[in-house]
Image: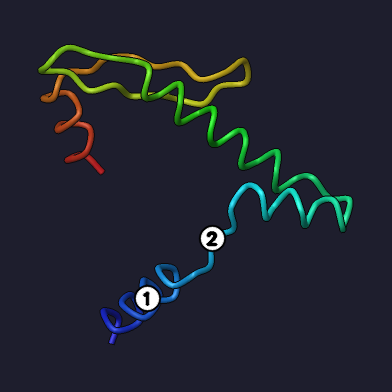
Amino acid sequence: MKGLIVLWAALLVGCAEIKTLEELEFAALESGDWSAVAERERNIEKRKRQRSFSCGSDAIAMCDERVRGTVCKCRSSQEVEDLLSSL
């Protein structure tokens, strides 16, 4: 039963409509609420910073959002595996 609920939730999330930045801006012009546009722009910038950060072939970039911006560090694949297995 629990598996069915998880599957149902995954289907709902997968079928959710995702608005483009242009659609969010148009809605903001009508409503005056620009918070969704600002959030999307922050997410876009965060992804750009993460993509531009590069590690060696046996390392993975791990980025944390901090008050003063995103901090990225290279971690070995083994460190990441150990981190994930402890969850």
Compared with 55, 13 (above or below) is: below
**Three-letter residue code for mark 2:** Ile
**Where is residue 41 drawn, in percent x and y?**
62, 35
Left or right for 60, reference 27: left
Q: How far apart are marks 2 and 1 (CA)?
A: 14 Å
The answer to which quarter of the image holds residue 85 is: top left
- The residue lying toward the viewer, choosing from 6 and 24, is 24
Looking at the rendered image, the quarter that the C terminus falls into is top left
Q: Name the residue under label 2.
A: 18
Looking at the rendered image, the quarter that the N terminus falls into is bottom left
Q: Which mark is residue 76?
A: none
SS state under label 1? helix
Q: How is the image coloured?
A: rainbow
Left or right for 84, reference 10: left
Q: Pointer 2 and pointer 1: residues touching (CB < 8 Å)?
A: no
Compared with 31, 14 (above or below) is: below
**Three-letter residue code for mark 1:** Leu
Q: Which residue is drawn at 33% across and 24% down?
A: 62
Left or right for 22, reference 50: right
Q: Mark 1 points at which residue?
A: 11
Q: Which residue is drawn at 40% across and 68% down?
A: 14
